[in-house]
Image (spheres, rainbow, N blue to C red):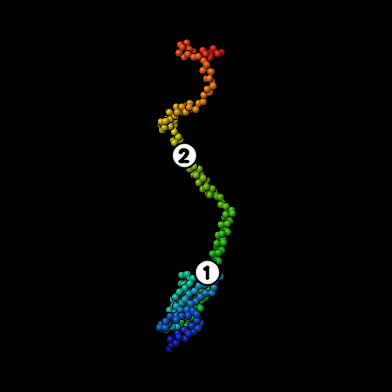
Amino acid sequence: MTDYGEEQRNELEAIESIYPDSFTVLSEAPTSFTITVTSEAGQNDETVEVTLKFTYVEKYPDDPPMWDIHSQQNLEDADIEDVLSLLKVQAEENLGMVMIFTLVSAVQEKLNEIVDQIKSRQEEEKKRKEKEAEEAEKVAFQGTIVTIETFLSWKAQFEQEVNELKKKKQKEEEQSGKNKLTGKQLFERDHNLDTSDIQFLEEAGNSVEVDESLFQDMDDLDLDEDDPDFDPLALGSDED
């Protein structure tokens, strides 16, 4: 008859000696413990990590232990599902034998594969960005290739813009014509225009200079303006 308790105790001692820094006992009844598994460092020193929780069942190792992901770092959901599936397959293949070390080793290899996949994805992403940059530079250098379709599209857009400018200019000219006032409209708007000319003449008259020397000799003349025979035009004719 198999002594399950003895086999479990022996394995637990061996596991503790193999993983002294990552092994932690959570409980003794039932026996439950965790082991932290870390991948090797990747290209940029990135790592992935998972802490596995195992619990012995009564008839372990004839029955598989229970397991779960206690915690994880840098793993995606799909990676976690892969780890859980791997544990199930390995447990079925090792029934009847203590298997914790085998399960942990399988997970260790899986994490290393995940790091390699991360490295590959990073390299692919780098190449993709470099290719996009090269294509963008090539397009900028060559310019836009003109086809019949692109030319017709540009021509239609250009004609539309020209027509819109013509309509705008015509509308502005029409509006300008409406805003221009006739002489009658100006007169009706400002009633002071009828007196403006008179004011201008009066102001101009006040500024006219008279040469008084032209009239100095007139003081010596004996003029009788009351004489009915007085004719100022005759004076001018006498001088001649």
User: Given contact means CB atoms under 8 Å apart, are the residues at marks 1 and 2 in contact?
Assistant: no
Q: Quadrant of residue 66?
A: bottom left
Residue underneath mark 2: 172
Q: How many marks?
A: 2
Compared to residue 223, the image places residue 121 above or below, namely below
Estimate the spatial distance between the alpha carbons at disc 1 and disc 2, rounded to whole Å. Answer: 66 Å
Residue 76 x %, y %: 47, 69
**Secondary structure category for the residue under label 2:** helix
Q: Residue at x 46, y 12 (%)?
A: 227
Q: Amino acid at mark 1?
A: Ile
The image shows residue 222 at horizontal and vertical percentages of 50, 14
Q: Pointer 1: residues within 10 angstroms few (<14), some, or many (20+)?
A: some
Where residue 34 sits, quadrant-wise, is: bottom left
Mark yes or no: residue 156 visible. no
Q: Left or right? Give the position of 2 relative to 146.
A: left
User: Which residue occupies the foreground of this view, 160 or 185?
Assistant: 185
Which residue occupies the foreground of this view, 227 or 169?
Answer: 227
Viewer-nearest of labels 1 and 2? 2
Q: Residues within 10 Å of mark 2 (few under 14, many from 20)?
A: few
From this viewpoint, is residue 240 visible?
Answer: yes
Residue picked out by circle 1: 118
Q: Is residue 89 above or below residue 239?
A: below
Q: Residue at x 55, y 59 (%)?
A: 132
- On the image, the x and y values in percent for residue 179 come to 44, 36
Q: Report the residue that reaches farthest toward the top.
A: 229
Q: Residue at x 54, y 21 (%)?
A: 213
The N terminus: image quadrant = bottom left
Which amino acid type is marked by label 2? Glu
